[in-house]
Every structure is written in structure tokens, then in C-alpha cells.
């Protein structure tokens, strides 16, 4: 079973939200936010579903996920009363977090809340030729990190504070 198959199987385990699963349910308009925005980069998993997969790699998956979230080392956001975690940030060969995504998250964490970090990764970015960082990071992690540093610098500049 491939990593993508595992992610698709999470729909049955509860909590996987690719945009396609929402069509025809009446939830498409509600999920027009970040859940749909991350669909092109692999979708999102609810925290409970993610822990099912993390259990394969970690003895204490809930604790591992909680540490990542508390340290702001991963992209996560709450929507519709569920904590969602985009799948683009995990290694294709397993469920470990990509170091380059962790680094970018930490850079942004000082100047953005969780929702803003998730939005930054999901939306088009001029510094990345108009592509969302979530799509670019797999092929050019350094460009994403540089874009995160530029965003942080802009947020901490004297002009941004006034």
C-alpha cells in the first residue's frame, strides 16, 4: 500500500478530507476554506485519523502530535470543531514531519497564529511564482524557507508595527 493509498484509506478511518469527498454533500461551501485549499497538496487529516497512522511509527502518537503542535513545528488549524493537519508536511516514505516544513513553521510561528501559518502555506505566494508553499516545498524547500523568512521580516519591520 502506498502512502497515498494510506491517506485515501483514512477517509474510512474518519477524518480525511480531500475536496472530492465533499462534492455533493452540501459541505462544499462550508469547506471552501483551508480544507479545500490543501486538497491539491494532499488534503488534510483530522487529528484522530492522523494518530492512527502515527501509531505505526511512534509508541505515543497523541503525545507526539501534541508536542509538534505545542512547539508549532507543524501546520495545523481548527475548523468545524476538528483539528486538521495537512498531509503535505509528512515524508512520503512515512509519517515523520519534513524538517524543511518544521523549520518554516518555526520561522513563521513568532509572527503568525496557527490559522495564519496554515493560510500562508495554502495560498499563492508571489515569492514562489504564484504557487502555494505547500505545493512548492517538496521540490524547492529552500525557496519556501526563504519566503517564510521574508514574511517574518515584513511582519517584524518597524513599518509593520505602526
Image (cartoon, rainbow, N blue to C red):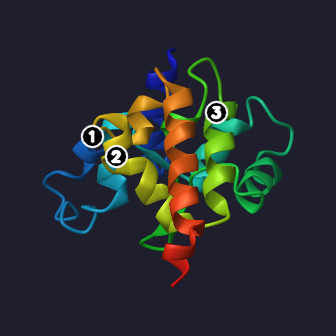
Distance CA(mark 2)–CA(mark 1)? 5 Å
Up-down relation of residue 162 to residue 40 (above or below)? below
Label 3 packing within 10 angstroms: few (<14), some (14-19), many (20+) = some
Which is nearer the eye, 28 or 126? 126
Judged left or right of residue 122, residue 24 is left
Tell me the residue at 17%/51% (across/down): 23
Which is nearer the eye, 26 or 31? 31
- Pointer 2 and pointer 1: residues touching (CB < 8 Å)? yes
Ranked by sequence position, the earlier of labels 2 and 1 is: 2
Tell me the residue at 44%/23% (across/down): 5
Residue hosting label 1:
130
Report helix, strand or loop for mark 2: loop
Q: Single out the residue that lies furthest toward the left.
A: 24
Up-down relation of residue 159 to residue 69 (above or below)? below
Ranked by sequence position, the earlier of labels 2 and 3 is: 3
Q: Single out the residue that lies furthest toward the bottom.
A: 162
Tell me the residue at 70%/57% (across/down): 72
- Residue 84 is situated, as x and y percent measured from the top left of the image, at 51, 57
Which is nearer the eye, 29 or 55? 29
Judged left or right of residue 119, residue 144 is right
Q: Answer yes or no: is residue 98 visible.
A: no
- Residue 7 is situated, as x and y percent measured from the top left of the image, at 47, 32
- Residue 48 is situated, as x and y percent measured from the top left of the image, at 61, 54
Q: Which mark is residue 125?
A: 2
Up-down relation of residue 155 to residue 56 (above or below)? below
Distance CA(mark 1)–CA(mark 3)? 20 Å
Ranked by sequence position, the earlier of labels 1 and 3 is: 3
Residue hosting label 3:
100
Amino acid at each position: 500500500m502506498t502512502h497515498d493509498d494510506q491517506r485515501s484509506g483514512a477517509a474510512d478511518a474518519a477524518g480525511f478530507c480531500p475536496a472530492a469527498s465533499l462534492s455533493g454533500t452540501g459541505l462544499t461551501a462550508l469547506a471552501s476554506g483551508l480544507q479545500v485549499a490543501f486538497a491539491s497538496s494532499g488534503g488534510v487529516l483530522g487529528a484522530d485519523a492522523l494518530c492512527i497512522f502515527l501509531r505505526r511509527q511512534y509508541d505515543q502518537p497523541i503525545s507526539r502530535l501534541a508536542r509538534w503542535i505545542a512547539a508549532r513545528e507543524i501546520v495545523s488549524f481548527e475548523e468545524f470543531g476538528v483539528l486538521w493537519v495537512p498531509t503535505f508536511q509528512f515524508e512520503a516514505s512515512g509519517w515523520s514531519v519534513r524538517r524543511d516544513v518544521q523549520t518554516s513553521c518555526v520561522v513563521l510561528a513568532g509572527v503568525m497564529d496557527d490559522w495564519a501559518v496554515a493560510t500562508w502555506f495554502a495560498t499563492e505566494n508571489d515569492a514562489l511564482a504564484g504557487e502555494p508553499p505547500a505545493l512548492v516545498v517538496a521540490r524547492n524547500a529552500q525557496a519556501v524557507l526563504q519566503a517564510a523568512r521574508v514574511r517574518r521580516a515584513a511582519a517584524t519591520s518597524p513599518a509593520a508595527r505602526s
